[in-house]
Image (spheres, grey):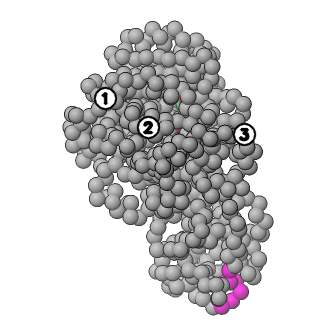
Amino acid sequence: MVNTNSFNPKPRAGRNGIPVFTEPKDLILSQQLYNINKFNLLVSDQIPLNRSLPDMRRKKCDHIFKECKDCPKTSIVIVFHNEAWSTLLRTVWSVINRSPRELLEEIILVDDASQREFLREPLEKYIKTLPVPTNLLRSSERIGLIQARLKGAAIAKGEVLTFLDAHCECTRGWLEPLLTVIRDDAKTVVCPIIDIINDQTFAYVKSFELHWGAFNWNLQFRWYTLGGSHLKKRKLDPTLPFDTPAMAGGLFAINRQYFYEIGSYDEGMAIWGGENLELSFRLWMCGGKVKIAPCSRVGHLFRKSSPYTFPGGIGKTLFSNLARVALVWLDEWADFFFKFNQPSRAVRDEQNVTSRLALKKKLQCKSFGWYLDNVWPEHFFPKKDRFFGQIKNVEADWCLIKPDTKELSNQPVGLATLEPCIRRNVSLEMFVMTKDGFIMTDDSICMDAPEGNTTTSGKVRIMACSGATRQKWRYNMKTKELRHITNDKCLDVPDSSKSTDGLVIEDCNDQQSQKWILESVPWT
Ligand code: LR7
Ligand code: MN
């Protein structure tokens, strides 16, 4: 089955990005096919390669479209390993159909040792018929996406390199907003807003606009809501490219010469993962920038799991890559990362990062502390000038914990509750308290209480950090009270229980249930 190409388009299926539902008679077949790529192949193979998509842009984006006359040309680099025919070529056709020809230097496909027959000769023949010069490079051994991209970049002729995953769909006007940013500043790397192609129905779904990219304590890439000041700026002109602490990794454009000046990729990284943070850190710390251009919108097929193998296992690949990121870029925060990330700690000593450290020195890059302060001041990492540790109630002798229910964006939400303190898991009961009074923990979640509720006691919740005053607290070391600043009430364990009932804010009364110990835990 893997070797057969079951591409069988129906002319109107999925037009304008609408969902395609599997007919009941095909359900079993579609489930069988699902496992090949971890998406609904039957549906993908029913949708034409040149399907229409909605124009995702705001009206105000129009001017950018027109201003791109003197934009640099780009090579499009798409690497793939055992991609399906329909998703790969829909990516290619979406580029061809929705990019001005004068801005398109070429398309470069890099096959990372795929084993599927239809990706051999049939693909070679097919690309010869395309109206845009298209190259196909092959790697006979599995080299992973990082080295595959380097292979593609090495033969590129365009002034700009634009990378895409092999299962994307570009919408109208996607390219111009990226290229104008690079035309205006060759040291800015720019990403589109990444919309969602549903893995079951292939519906094109709009994603959040008010998010930026960052990462959690385990160096996993995450989208987080923009903080208050950024939000205001964005609302003034929603078409303007905005800074992001990190890029997702798969979809971005970069000036080709600058890509090499800044050190392309870490060739010691294998297969998959971590390269997006490594590049983001390097750019920000070494004089570049990473931005998202909201007028550029590209769909990406999001999967719940990975369809392919990781040669050598995930320890030799992802966790080694992350260990390299930490060793090169995290300075004293590397201790924090390794302390709480066992899989990466296990492969730490195998990493030789000498050449990357030499690069960092040569480029005179700034520190991770500088990055946190200047690029991502809203971060929730420990720092010298803030508390890091457990928040313990004196009476109950239990600790504040993070809820385990997650919302869409992967951020936990729920009532603030207590559990016995056993330090079983760093990201479960470690909190940071900043100088500004935000009590935060991993994945950008904060302790939050409703404002202006003076008569009844308010339930305290753990939810996405917003930077709002309702998330500000003050700790008094003498009285041991944790006061909600705007309500001037105290964090309290309600009478009913000392345990898993939610915490509340109550009028301050000097009772034991309102006394808290902030117990520091060393993180370096
Ligand atoms: O060994 C491999 N060889 C490859 O050529 C493994 C993968 N690949 C190809 C693969 O066929 C695909 O085209 O590399 C591309 C990326 O692999 P995916 O699609 O499995 O990755 P992903 O979309 O799950 O993961 C994201 O993180 C990766 C970390 O290494 C890469 O940076 C991906 O490019 C990146 N994808 C995106 O940024 C899309 C938006 C996701 C978000 C948020
Ligand atoms: Mn992908």
- Tell me the magenta residue range: 510-516
Q: Position of residue 294 (x, y in %)?
A: 35, 46
Q: Which residue is mark 3?
A: 350
Q: Give the side of residue 5 with respect to residue 284, left or right.
A: right
Q: Is residue 233 above or below residue 33?
A: below
Q: CA distance from mark 2 to mark 3?
A: 27 Å
If you read the primary sequence from the N terminus, does the residue marked by circle 2 or circle 1 appear first? Answer: 1
- The residue at 67%/56% (across/down) is 335
Q: Estimate how packed mark 2 is, as few (under 14), some (14 to 19) or many (20 or more) residues with alpha carbons within 10 Å.
A: few
- The amino acid pointed to by label 1 is Lys
Q: CA distance from mark 2 to mark 1?
A: 19 Å
- The residue at 59%/47% (across/down) is 328
- Secondary structure, mark 2, is helix
Q: CA distance from mark 1 to mark 3?
A: 41 Å
**Dot 2 beta carbon under 8 Å from ligand 1:** no
Q: Is residue 512 magenta?
A: yes
Q: Is residue 234 above or below residue 41?
A: below
- The amino acid pointed to by label 3 is Glu
- Secondary structure, mark 1, is loop
- The residue at 53%/55% (across/down) is 367
Q: Estimate how packed mark 3 is, as few (under 14), some (14 to 19) or many (20 or more) residues with alpha carbons within 10 Å.
A: few
Q: Which residue is mark 2?
A: 261
Labels 2, 3: front one: 2
**Dot 1 beta carbon under 8 Å from ligand 1:** no
